[in-house]
Image: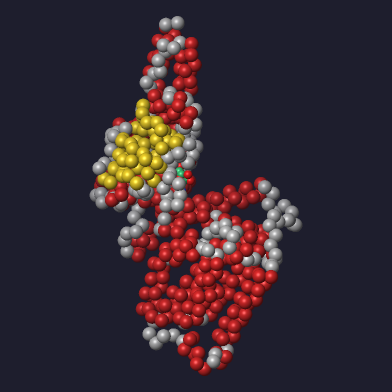
Amino acid sequence: MTSLKLLEGFRFLEGQSFMHRVDPRVKMFLALVFMILSLLFDTVYPMITLFCLTFPFIIIAQRVKRWFLTIKSSIFLFLLILTLNTIFLSFSAAVAMCLRLLVLISSFSIFFLTVHPDDLAAALVALKLPYSFSFSISLSFRYVPTLALEVQTIMEAQKSRGLELEKGNLFTRVKNFLPIIVPLVLLSMRRALLVAESLESRGFGTSEKRNFYKQISMSAKDWILFSLLLILLVGGIFIKIMPALIPDGFAWFFQNWPL
Amino acid sequence: MIVLDNVSFRYSNDTAWVLKNNSLRIDQGEYIAILGQNGAGKSTLVRLLNGLLRPTQGNVYINGMNTSNSSVAELAREVGLVFQNPDHQLFAQTVRDELQFSVKTLEWSAEKQNNAIKETLTQLDLTLFSDRSPFKLSGGEKRRTSIGTIWVRDPSILILDEPTTGQDAVQKRNLASLLSRLQTYGKTIFLVTHDIEFTIKHCPRVIILKEGQIIGDGPTMKVFSNQRIMSEACLFPPQIIRLIWKLQETHPNLSMPNNPQEFTQSIENFLKNQ
Ligand SMILES: Nc1ncnc2c1ncn2[C@@H]1O[C@H](COP(=O)(O)OP(=O)(O)OP(=O)(O)O)[C@@H](O)[C@H]1O
Ligand SMILES: [Mg+2]
């Protein structure tokens, strides 16, 4: 079941929270801002700050449980990053790296947990992207749960003929994924062709102009959140490119631990 | 031997029960079918038998092993589960590699492995395809290959999830003779199916599942001619049973045959007495 749990934090679930009602474009911007900021800095305290800024959004969206499932099932990844970075860099860099992953997961989790695939398409269209492009993106997200279920079934089918996924060294484990990946790719390719045919037979792309069932528009709260995020982004970039701006007593905040 | 002892199952604590309090005993060498509407819980039940799922309450025993204390790999030696869609299973370059992969985990000698593969290829009529890619086979050939990937491991219990869907009449007949042959080797055959005609023709015993509960279990003709069970499970009785019913309306002393083979006999007797 791990494969399914990992995706829990990225699967849309209907809700009534404030975060659910925020314009999808603003939520997209939110994920981008936190992604950029977390990649911009690489020390512990800024990462903690970023996490403290993202986490409240998950609380507001009332999706802490889902988010936690994802974090819990990626614990192996976290440990791997922690070990490798401690060996090759330093402990403090390793902690920062883990926190960065946490921030990345959390910010994208906010987006996918609260944006309905249809709204995603509408948002991309509103950003003036070609419809066929936005449609394929939202369609691929639509297929994430299907894919997860398929992985589950394939794993069960291979386990039934004696494949042990949890056993062996790293090399055998990687090799063991072949019997999972091959059927998955083949099934997905076949489905892609079927979906394309079915879309065509329903007249997809016959007219240039089309109308949308769902309309999105920015409200006052969306603009406020957008502005706050913009200030945060600009502030972060300024501090990064002009370290002179940092007040004297605060330099430690942006430095690594001496470990 | 398969024993279900008061088994209940649900996928998680906050979802409904999928199986409710079922007990069942299947002896070695039986040929048995399980029927029920979509969502009745057939595939779930079958997954409980090889440890892919563990009962939420109660116990499942396979040849004496409690599935709750055994790994899937251990159980897979006893129970071979053939999935509905061969595309979920096939991945290797050739049919032979596909079989090879299945026996690799069994700690058999190279000689035993090769013999098993050769034997399976012959029995399943796959020798001609042994060096072909499994992806270039027809639907029926793919299914035979996927049965082969399980059969080659020589499990004592063979479970097939809806093996007859999408198969033409010839393929169905081939499958039937294949399964009967397996049964003569003393294997337990357990079919999940919607195919009533196939069941009445080949399976001496049938189980009817409805909303997670076994509502019928017994000799196939008996269960299928039980109007209460059939209507509760939304199953339509097979033609021969409906014919007997129709005749019984005017000839109340005509008895229901115990199996399809006896059917001809009863009709002949019936005509003679006219
Ligand atoms: N992985 C799962 N997680 C949660 N619920 C599930 C899962 N798999 C099946 N179910 C639910 O369990 C119930 C029984 O499903 P199951 O697949 O066992 O039915 P089935 O009898 O095999 O049906 P079919 O004839 O359609 O194959 C259904 O209500 C289904 O929604
Ligand atoms: Mg099923």
> Residue B39 in the image: x percent, y percent?
47, 41
Name the residue rendered at 47%, 25% in the picture.
B237
At horizontal 53% and vertical 63% (from top left) the residue drawn is A62
Q: Position of residue B15 (x, y in %)?
A: 46, 49
**Left or right of A121, for residue A36:** left
* Vertical position of residue B263 compared to residue B29: above or below: above
Q: Answer with the quarter of the image where residue A228 lies.
A: bottom right
* Count of labels in the image: 0
Q: Residue at x 38, y 71 (%)?
A: A79
Position of residue A144 measured from the top left corner of the image (x, y, whole percent): 53, 57
The image's colour scheme reads: secondary structure
Residue B114 visible somewhere in the drawing: no
Query: Looking at the image, which residue is at 42% across and 13% down?
Result: B254
Q: Would you say residue A51 is visible in this rendering?
A: yes
B54 sits left or right of B249 in the view: left
Q: Is residue A210 above or below residue A228?
A: above
Q: Residue furthest bottom?
A: A248
- Residue situated in front as seen by the camera: A9 or A32: A9
Q: Quadrant of residue B251?
A: top left
Residue A259 percent across, percent down from the top left: 38, 85
Q: Is residue B24 above or below residue A222?
A: above
Look at the image and tell me in which quarter the N terminus of chain A lies: bottom left
Q: Is residue B207 above or below residue A117?
A: above
